[in-house]
């Protein structure tokens, strides 16, 4: 027995994470393996966060391309609130760059050397919401085989960016509000109170005042989230920035696909300036990626952009691909529901997370 213990100690000293004594118990073996798998996932997530923050520290502030008059009020607010610990609500249509703004605010804050954790609230199902945000202890529910650290604890001393904040389930909003008010949280299944020091940045394309009036969002939670609100204008209202953004995305995609590109033909730039951009900056990025792949020369031509001209007939549904039909139906559902993803998903007969996957696929 002493020899076994000595061997285990020596193995741990050389980097082993755990050991199993012979003859082993199958249940203990499975539990040990599950624990190590979960630990491995946590370590990978920690390294990912550190890499993301190392990039921000190395490069300084994330690049902002915003010289238009429409963007100046937002930029002025950003400069004022970035050094503070104030919670900030970033609003704007899909694809306007809300996450870029959140990362800039973190990088310009006194918390820049600490983690910035990004959470897509819309992708979290209501059944595991508290577990994801606050963590859980082993055995607290059926699938809780190990302890789990939540996003709030991962972001301790740093910044937590909550995208699509309007999708927090109404039944979970009280627990979320308590953490914002007190800085205290409890893992699911635990009686231990933990203190966290987190700055919360959140984003939405939904009018939260309307959600409050409809009873689907708590008014006191809204007040906690929007100490300062930064509104981002749609791309159609900041057309002066389109040439700069287009050049930026062209250079990025040219490097990505190892293409030697030399700008835009005149009619291509005119088409970019005239396009309505319902998908905003994200749509512009996808259009330029496609154009770099499609062009035969070293300048982007109008036909490389894939825009439909007025002289071209509108596609009938029977002439469209399945993906084109699905994209059109999603755009229509979002328009009917004022951009509210939850209501759009319900009208389409999809779960919220399924709709989010499609929004990301189609760049909407």
Image (tube, grey):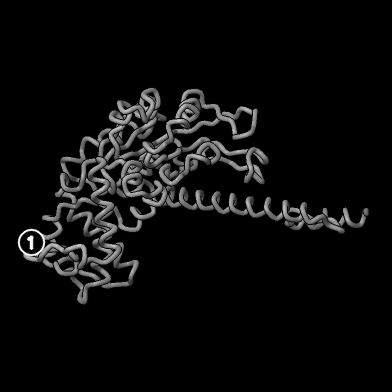
Q: Is residue 155 visible?
A: no
Q: Secondary structure at mark 1?
A: loop
**Where residue 312 appears, x then y in whole percent?**
10, 66
Query: Which quadrant would the N terminus be assigned to in this image?
Result: bottom right
In the image, is 363 to the left or to the right of 19? left
Could you classify mark 1 by the number of other residues whose Cα lies within 10 Å: few (under 14), some (14-19), or many (20 or more)? few
**Where residue 186 appears, x then y in whole percent?**
59, 30
Q: How many marks?
A: 1
- Classify 116 as above or below 252: above
Residue closest to the far left: 311
Q: At 33% from the left edge and 70% from the top edge, which residue is drawn? A: 257
Q: Which quadrant of the structure image shows residue 344? A: top left
Q: Which quadrant of the structure image shows residue 262? A: bottom left
Pick whichever, 162 or 110, lies toward us.
Answer: 162
Q: At 19% from the left edge and 66% from the top edge, which residue is drawn? A: 306
Q: At 24% from the left edge and 61% from the top edge, which residue is drawn? A: 287
Q: Is residue 23 visible?
A: yes
Q: At 35% from the left edge and 58% from the top edge, which residue is drawn? A: 361
Residue marked by disc 1: 310
**Where residue 288 appears, x then y in whole percent?**
24, 62
**Where residue 144 appears, x then y in whole percent?**
63, 44
Q: Which quadrant of the structure image shows residue 252? A: bottom left
- Classify 326 as above or below 66: below
Pick whichever, 62 or 312, lies toward us.
Answer: 312
- Classify 274 as above or below 159: below
């Amino acid at each position: 027995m002493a020899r076994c213990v000595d061997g285990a100690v020596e193995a741990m000293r050389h980097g082993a994470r755990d050991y199993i004594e012979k003859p082993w118990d199958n249940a203990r073996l499975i539990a040990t393996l599950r624990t190590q798998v979960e630990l491995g996932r946590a370590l990978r997530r920690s390294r990912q966060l550190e890499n993301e923050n190392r990039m921000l520290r190395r490069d300084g502030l994330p690049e902002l391309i915003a010289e238009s008059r429409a963007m100046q009020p937002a930029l002025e607010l950003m400069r004022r609130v970035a050094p503070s610990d104030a919670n900030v609500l970033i609003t704007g249509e899909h694809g306007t760059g809300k996450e870029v703004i959140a990362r800039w605010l973190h990088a310009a804050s006194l918390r820049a050397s600490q983690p910035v954790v990004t959470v897509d609230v819309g992708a979290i199902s209501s059944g595991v919401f508290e577990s994801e945000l606050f963590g859980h202890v082993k055995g607290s529910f059926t699938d809780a085989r190990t302890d789990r650290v939540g996003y709030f604890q991962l972001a301790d001393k740093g910044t937590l960016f909550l995208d699509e904040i309007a999708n927090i389930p109404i039944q979970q909003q009280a627990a979320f509000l308590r953490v914002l008010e007190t800085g205290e949280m409890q893992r699911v299944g635990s009686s231990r109170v933990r203190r966290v020091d987190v700055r919360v940045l959140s984003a939405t394309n939904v009018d939260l005042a309307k959600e409050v009036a409809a009873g689907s969002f708590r008014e006191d939670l809204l007040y906690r989230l929007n100490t300062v609100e930064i509104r981002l204008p749609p791309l159609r209202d900041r057309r002066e920035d389109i040439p700069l953004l287009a050049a930026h995305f062209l250079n990025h995609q040219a490097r990505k696909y190892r293409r030697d590109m030399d700008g835009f033909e005149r009619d291509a730039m005119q088409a970019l300036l005239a396009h309505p951009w319902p998908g905003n900056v994200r749509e512009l990025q996808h259009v330029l990626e496609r154009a770099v792949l499609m062009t035969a020369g070293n300048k982007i031509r109008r036909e490389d952009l894939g825009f439909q001209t007025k002289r071209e007939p509108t596609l009938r549904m029977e002439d469209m691909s399945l993906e084109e039909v699905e994209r059109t139906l999603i755009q229509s559902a979002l328009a009917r529901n004022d951009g509210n993803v939850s209501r759009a998903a319900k009208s389409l007969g999809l779960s919220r997370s399924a709709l989010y996957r499609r929004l990301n696929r189609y760049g909407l």
